[in-house]
Amino acid sequence: MPATTRTTLRRGLAAAAALPLLIGVLASCGYGSEAKNDDDSTKKVAAEGEKLSADTVRLGYFPNLTHATALVGDQEGILQKELGGTKLVPTTFNAGPSEIEALNAGSIDIGFIGPSPSINGFVKTKGTNLRIVGGAASGGVKLVVNPAKIKTVDDLKGKKIATPQLGNTQDVAFLNWISEKGWKVDAQSGKGDVSVVRTDNKVTPNAYASGAVDGAWVPEPTASKLVADGAKVLLDESDLWPDKKFVITNIIVSQKFLKEHPDVVEAFLRGSVKTNEWINANQDKAKASANAKLKALSGKALGAKVIDAAWPSIQFTNDPLAATLQAQADHAVKAGLLEKPELSGIYDLKPLNKVLKAAGQPEVSDAGLGAK
């Protein structure tokens, strides 16, 4: 790949790498850049309790199932309870780049976001702005196909498969998988033995219904929306990873906010840990809670057929699965979408591990990528 093309791609990746954690109509990463204030939440009076070092903490997340820790933690008041008199002010985003821009601009303090935007946000500022301080979710990504056209993996050759966005997490994963099959695809154009068609998650179901694409490598619940429309699951991405785990959602924080308000970050992480604990202990209630929050944000809940199929494929975990973030960065380099990034210092898991130790839970690793 010419150097100029690689440079253009690298620059475009920071703007394109929205983590498409999907949600059909509520697409997860890479479907526009508007931010939306959660009016109901911002009007809530902060829970009674002592105010921490900040009056407010401004949270960003996607109205997306892979961000259910945020959805449920906000809906159930678990995050606010841990923050006490410090008011939680949530804002929702429809794209990773716009959330990173908001963090860089100081419009939000903490965010739930996917690995590709995390990597690009860190690299773009030469490691000066964000830190990953926790994990939230693993899995929830599938290759679904038209069963009338594709019955086996070999049938993918010559077909049109959608990914959410050039250089986003699912796009990189699909390109890497294609490469391992020995097939050739030009990463920039998507042309080759398989045609990779970059399509926003919110329009992928219509593209599939019209025959414009023959399948899609997408996150939940877009995958289950396609299945509800007649597609079949050909591959679950979790089957490609050790222990079937790979990061799909991180918790990031502005380094400035972390330095000035470590007590707020620690309280927020206590809330996220307690939220994940509640989700994992109350799966049906948590699923209903996440769907209720989605309805409040979008005006429409996911249908039972879709959410019931999507929910079990997502694991909610405090572990950021740091080794898999490094692997995803390596896949992007291999695909020619990114020059080898320096990721040392992208994690600061000391506050999370303090919270986990106090809760009697095992500490998690930064895979050697922690801040010194």
Image (cartoon, rainbow, N blue to C red):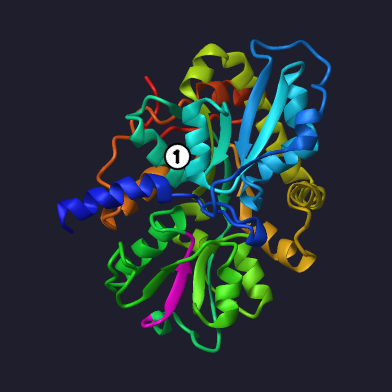
Q: Quadrant of residue 183?
A: bottom left
Q: Residues within 10 Å of mark 1 (few under 14, many from 20)?
A: many
Seen as rendered, the residue at the extreme left is 2
In the rendered image, which quarter contains the N terminus?
Answer: bottom left
Picture coordinates of residue 216 (x, y %)?
A: 51, 70
Establish if 313 lies above or below 153: above
Whether residue 43 sits left or right of residue 210 in the image: it is right
Nearer to me, 228 or 314: 228
Secondary structure beneath label 1: helix
Nearer to me, 202 or 324: 202
Segment colored magenta: 157-164
Indicate whether residue 161 is drawn in magenta: yes
Residue at the image position 74 percent from the left and 63 percent from the top: 308
Establish if 119 lies above or below 313: above
Q: Quadrant of residue 223?
A: bottom right
Picture coordinates of residue 119 (x, y %)?
A: 40, 40
